[in-house]
Image: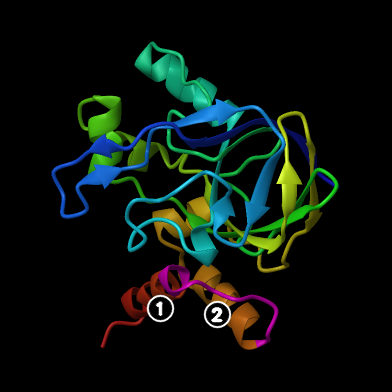
Amino acid sequence: MTTGILLAVCRVHELLPTKDSTGVTAIDKRAVDGPVNVHPLGLTGDIQASRKHHGGPTKALYAYSQDDAEFWAQQLGREVTPGLFGENLRVAGIDASNAVIGERWSVGEQVVLEVTMPRTPCVNFARYLGERSWVKRFAEANRVGTYLSVVTKGSVSAGDTIRVTSVPEHGVTAAQVYAGPDERQAHALLDAAAAGHLALTPQVRKAALQALKVASPA
């Protein structure tokens, strides 16, 4: 069983103005002292300014791995502190980007989370970081982290142990979904869902169906 550590719990520090229709973004996340309560829509005290693109039950929490943060620290020549990428959970020992869709994590003594889909970078993320061609660079590296739903609520704190308690047999990861699943991966996701072993988000289902459409043109 894979185990890791929750390095930091992060929630919104300040709403920042944007040029889109929402008018603000909650991407400015920073580490806070625990314990922090976890509920079906995320962390107590955190918000998502645009629920159309962020948040909701299938995107309640966003996790990012320390190894990926260190990769970007070298690339950018700056420290990637917990929360800088808008994540709620900074984790070590767990590869969030390569977590399997439907994989479950037990965090601390109470909380159970389920991997749902990869994060898609947006223009507000790029503006916040102030890095040139950031969306393209982040996408090409495919170190995107993962969104999680809340299976069992409770509280979490920095230092909590994370245990990967179950991994679906289909084996398709968040990064593979983000890159565009191949035909085998698409069938594996859809078959697992049809068998009742997995609840696919609309975004993941769309990616799988698109892969089969491309593989079998009319």
Tag 2's secondary structure?
Answer: helix
Q: Residue at x 72, y 41 (%)?
A: 156
Amino acid at dot 1: Leu
Image location (x, y in percent) of residue 43: 58, 48
Residue at the extreme front of the image, as rendered: 45
Numbered range of the magenta stretch: 195-204
**Residue marked by disc 2:** 190
Judged left or right of residue 214, residue 43 is right
Q: Earlier in the sequence, mark 2 or mark 1?
A: 2
Please identify the quadrant where the C terminus is shown.
Answer: bottom left
For the residues labelled 2 and 1, say whether their Cβ atoms are less than 8 Å apart: yes
Answer with the quarter of the image where residue 34 lies.
top right
Q: Reply above or below: 64 against 179.
A: above
Nearer-the-camera pick, 215 or 130: 130
**Residue marked by disc 1:** 209
Judged left or right of residue 13, residue 216 is left
